[in-house]
């Protein structure tokens, strides 16, 4: 499930050299959402991740939290945690008592290397449409311009007053729908740079696998 969450976030950042045909109303909202998030010291989210596979009749739920600050992040899930300080990533598995260290590829534009890009990726590679304006939120769909993409659309629910992310739904062609429900959204936290670095002294007896 951890990889599935990263795939969902990575899918929310697709590279394309083609500019989409966009709904001006949707772009105006997305621009405000993006600038609000990117101007904050960090974006902290506590979430529930739900994956529904209609083909296999399977339903999985996973709680977690993430803090994103520029191109740093810390992701916490029940069975593992990931720290990324913009250059180095630490993937900690408590059940195995091991942490794997890797270094990012500067040419990599995925979420793992450029997490803050999820707030601006809509600007290319997608067609956007404002589906509905509700009393307290906007519903916006993003459609991939690449017809070979494995998903049909990304649907965002954005709060009106705070320009906060309420949910992100990723609908795939294979019948799987993955939804990221945000339960807490905070733009005020100012994490110290050390927050995004694994501290071995806090995890005694952990095996370190250094892949750098």
Image (cartoon, grey):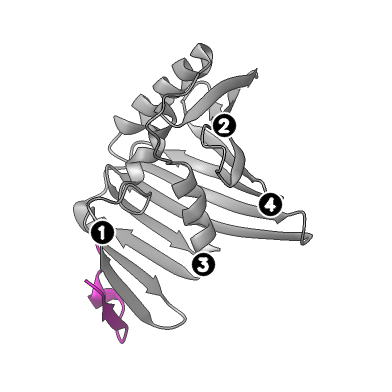
Mark toward the viewer: 3 or 4: 4
**Left or right of 201 on screen, residue 183:** right
Mark toward the viewer: 1 or 4: 4
**Left or right of 41 on screen, residue 55:** right
Other-residue count near label 3 (Cα within 10 Å), few / some / many at <14 / 14–19 / ≥20: few
**Mark 1 / mark 2, whichever is N-terminal:** 1
Q: Which mark is residue 78?
A: 3
Q: Quadrant of the N terminus?
A: bottom right
Does the magenta segment cover residue 10? no
- Residue highlighted by disc 1: 104
- Residue highlighted by disc 4: 174
CA–CA distance in space, label 1 to label 2: 29 Å
CA–CA distance in space, label 1 to label 4: 30 Å
Q: Which residues are magenta?
A: 197-212
CA–CA distance in space, label 2 to label 4: 16 Å
**Mark 3 / mark 4, whichever is N-terminal:** 3
Q: Secondary structure at mark 3?
A: loop
Q: Secondary structure at mark 4?
A: loop
């Amino acid at each position: 499930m951890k990889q599935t969450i990263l795939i969902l976030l990575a899918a929310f950042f697709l590279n394309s050299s083609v500019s989409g045909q966009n709904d001006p109303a949707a772009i105006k909202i997305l621009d405000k959402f993006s600038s609000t998030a990117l101007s904050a010291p960090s974006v902290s989210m506590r979430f529930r991740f739900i994956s529904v596979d209609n083909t296999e009749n399977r339903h999985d739920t996973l709680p977690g939290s993430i803090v994103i600050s520029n191109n740093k992040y810390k992701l916490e899930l029940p069975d593992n945690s990931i720290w990324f300080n913009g250059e180095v990533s630490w993937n900690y598995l408590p059940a195995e008592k091991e942490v794997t260290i890797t270094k990012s590829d500067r040419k990599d534009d995925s979420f793992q290397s450029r997490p803050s890009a999820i707030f601006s990726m809509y600007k290319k590679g997608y067609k956007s449409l404002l589906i509905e304006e509700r009393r307290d939120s906007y519903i916006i769909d993003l459609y991939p311009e690449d017809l070979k993409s494995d998903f049909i659309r990304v649907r965002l629910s954005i709060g009106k007053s705070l320009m906060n992310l309420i949910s992100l739904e990723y609908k795939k062609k294979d019948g799987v729908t993955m939804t990221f429900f945000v339960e807490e959204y905070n733009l005020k936290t100012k994490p110290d740079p050390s927050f995004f670095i694994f501290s071995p002294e806090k995890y005694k007896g952990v095996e370190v696998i250094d892949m750098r």
